[in-house]
Image (cartoon, rainbow, N blue to C red):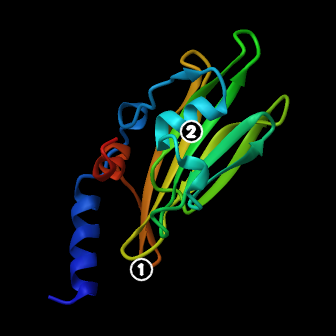
Amino acid sequence: MNGRVLDSIIWVAAAASATFSGSMAHTTERKCYANLDQFMIAKFGEDYKMDENISHKVASGALLMVTDKTAETNPSRYFLLPEVENNKICLVLDAPIALEVKFEQYQSGNFPKTIKTKSGGQGPDIDISYAWRKQSKKYLPAKCSSTHNDKTMAISCKSALAPFGK
């Protein structure tokens, strides 16, 4: 069986189970740290500073983005938000397949209400739109889709994130 046929079978199987599962799919555990260094050590180990695949930058407003490019095709991205009231930094989104990242629908202070990620590489592209949930103070999957051979269809966020243990 050639790769194109296998890709088509996988895409059709994903389409057959397509439903909107929204926030039931992937729930980032909102955990807070004393500072960015504590998060980096907890996530990547004491030697993270020597790993050229791990970087961080201000993503939008006060939102920080940590990128792990170990998986070159679809790097993992972690979004953290400083909390002034308790002087901590909190993980608000763990996006496992994020070759591309876009911020949309800004609130005051240049804070994005929506973060969209897109996968890359072989097989169908997976687009995941994460929405800010004020009550839980984190981003949750809101809408997922798969694009294959220029055809886009809605898929379950749960099935999109399941291969990544999310």
5 left or right of 125 in image: left
Q: Residue at 27% of width from left, 60% of height from top? A: 14
Measure the alpha-carbon separation of dots 2 and 1. Answer: 38 Å
Q: Are the residues at dot 2 and dot 1 in contact (C-beta closer than 8 Å)?
A: no
Name the disc covering residue 149, or none: 1
SS type, badge 1: loop
Residue 160, given in percent of the width and then of the height, sits at: 35, 52
The residue pinned by badge 2 equals 40
Q: Residue at 48% of width from left, 69% of height from top? A: 73
42 left or right of 66 in image: left
Q: Amino acid at mark 1?
A: Asn
Q: Quadrant of residue 153?
A: bottom left
Residue farthest left in this picture: 1
Q: Badge 2 local density, few (<14 within 10 Å), some, or many (20+)?
A: some
Q: Which quarter shows the C terminus?
A: top left
Residue 116, given in percent of the width and then of the height, sits at: 59, 50
